[in-house]
Each structure stands twice: as C-alpha cells, then as structure tokens.
Image: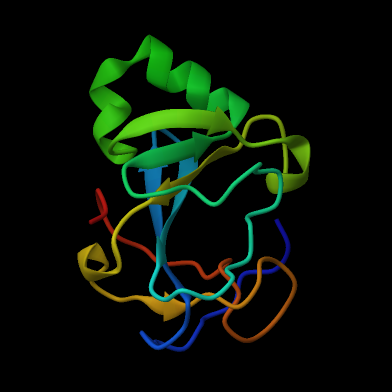
Amino acid sequence: MGQWAQGACALSADGVYQKFLDPYGSRPFRRIFLARAGPGPVPRPPGVAAFPGPGEGVVSPVLRDVLAANPGVSGFVPGRVTGTIGAAGFGGPDELYAYVGTAPDKLTAPHALERFGGGGGTDGSTRRSSTRGP
C-alpha cells in the first residue's frame, strides 16, 4: 500500500478521507472512508475500478471472506460491498482492508485526498486509529 503518512485536515479538496485502524483478533483491520467534497476529479484507490459512492464498500479478498463468514463484523463496513480490491490495492493476501464511500459531513476528522500511496503529504494512506468509523 505504500508508506503511511499523516495528512493535513482540509475540507476544500474535491476528495476527503479518514483512516481507521482496528484489531480483528490479532490482525490489523484497515479502513479508509472516502467522500467526494467537490465537483472536481478525485484519485481512484489502487486496485479499485471506481471511487466508491456513499454506502458502497470495496474490500480485500480476505475481508470479503471474513464478512461472509461473520455477519456481525459487517458494521465495520457500513452499506453494501460493491467490489473487491485487486492485488495492486493491498500489501498481502491476508490483509483486512476496505475503502468505504461516505458523505463528507460523516467524517469526524477529514483529510484532503490528493493521491494514494508513497510518502509524505496528504495521500489517502494516512493511518488513523479509532473504533467502528463514521
């Protein structure tokens, strides 16, 4: 997924995000909530066919299997799962990862979404710890 970097908060960007990191047993469970905040272009997450809209989730293959086997976990990925993240979008076959579309006003600490992956600045790969999500 590239490096994790802390992003600057800004609602004036066309895309915003908030990252959540929770445990699932002994494994990390990473979710990036994404929202369109303006009419301009927004970067598409790697391994994802389209930017998820509000109420849509795109998950890693192993998370898809976990959600199917454990419906009680579905609250961590609100809405409906509309796709699976391709190999370019996660670090390994056992990674629990989700991109979840939402509305900008549902994010409690939004960050400007400029790009995904690689290094400093605001990049959609910002690690944010919390429980549940917006």
Q: Nearer the viewer, residue 42 or 17?
A: 42
Give residue 12's position: percent from left, percent from top: 40, 88
Q: Which residue is rendered at x = 65% and y = 43% of the image?
A: 48
Residue 51 in the image: state x and y as whole percent: 54, 52
Quarter the C terminus occupies: bottom left
Is 96 situated left or right of 110 in this image? right
User: Of 77 and 104, which appears nearest the observer?
Assistant: 104
Residue 62: which quarter of the image?
Answer: top right
5 over 27 or under it: above or below: below
Position of residue 94 relative to residue 115, above or below, is above
Is 55 displayed left or right of 92 in the figure?
A: left
x, y percent for residue 3: 70, 68
Q: Residue at x 39, y 51 (%)?
A: 101
**Which residue sits at x=41%, y=49%?**
53
Query: How many tags in the picture?
Result: 0
- Left or right: where 52 falls relative to 49: left
Q: Nearer the viewer, residue 123 or 43?
A: 43
Tell me what residue is drawn at x 66 percent, y 41 percent. 49
**Image quadrant occupied by the N terminus:** bottom right
Name the image quarter holding residue 125: bottom right
Picture quadrant where residue 88 is located: top right
Q: In the current view of this chain or complex, which residue is farthest to the top?
A: 69
Left or right: residue 101 compared with residue 98: left
**What percent of the width, then of the height, locates residue 40?**
53, 76
